[in-house]
Image (cartoon, rainbow, N blue to C red):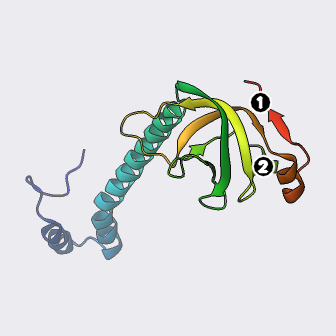
Amino acid sequence: MVRLFPHPAPSPQGRREYLRQTGISTVVLSLIDLEPAYKLNSMRRITLALIIMAATFKANAQMDFGPDKEINNVKATIHFLNEDLAVLIPVDNEGGRYISPQLPVEYKKEGLKVTFNGVTGKIPPNVRMMGTPLTITKIWVTAAEKKKFKLKKCKYVIKQ
């Protein structure tokens, strides 16, 4: 290993001055000054990538919610929190919300009144969610709702 500087190494300004006195070109000076910052940025990027990967794996592991209780004949209204996230708001509990990936695409209509059966999931401690996780087993609408929203099917039975 070749040492350019006496031990202990001087500050960055001292290194620059020392290299100027020895006749090193300015291109080499700029590369030497940038090298530690480049290595630090690379290490930060690698560390950040590893942290993101670990968080992703942990989040995926937490998405499997254990069953909490079975619910039947719950009347609810479909409401969108944003353009992609539809929630089921129970008629008897306006403050409650259920989120389910099994909600049929045909039923993703703002204001649609549905009735469903399913199993709620336990939310892990220290996890905040937009609603209670729900595994739908059966979901249906009345004939009037079917006609009003021009739906193809009145009832969906979802097999687990």
Q: Quadrant of residue 50?
A: top left
- Which quadrant of the figure contains the C terminus? top right
Q: Which residue is drawn at 91% across and 47% down?
A: 152
Q: What residue lies at 34% left-to-right and 66% top-to-bottom?
A: 31
Q: Which residue is tagged 2? A: 107
Between the C-alphas of marks 1 and 2, the distance is 14 Å
Disc 1 residue crowd, few under 14, some 14–19, many 20+, Cα 10 Å: some
Q: In this view, does 116 lie to the left or right of 95?
A: right
Furthest-left residue in this view? 8
Q: Which of marks 1 and 2 is nearer the N terminus?
A: 2
Q: Where is residue 30 in the image (x, y as percent from the top left)?
A: 32, 71
- State left or right for residue 24 relative to residue 138: left
The amino acid type of the residue labelled 1 equals Ile
Residue 7's tag is none
Q: In this view, does 14 lie to the left or right of 125?
A: left
x and y percentages locating residue 150 in the rendered image? 89, 56
The residue closer to the viewer here, 96 or 12, is 96
Mark 2 is on which residue type? Tyr
How far across and how far down the image is residue 71, in percent? 61, 30
Q: Is mark 1 on a helix, strand or loop?
A: loop
Residue to which mark 1 is pinned: 158
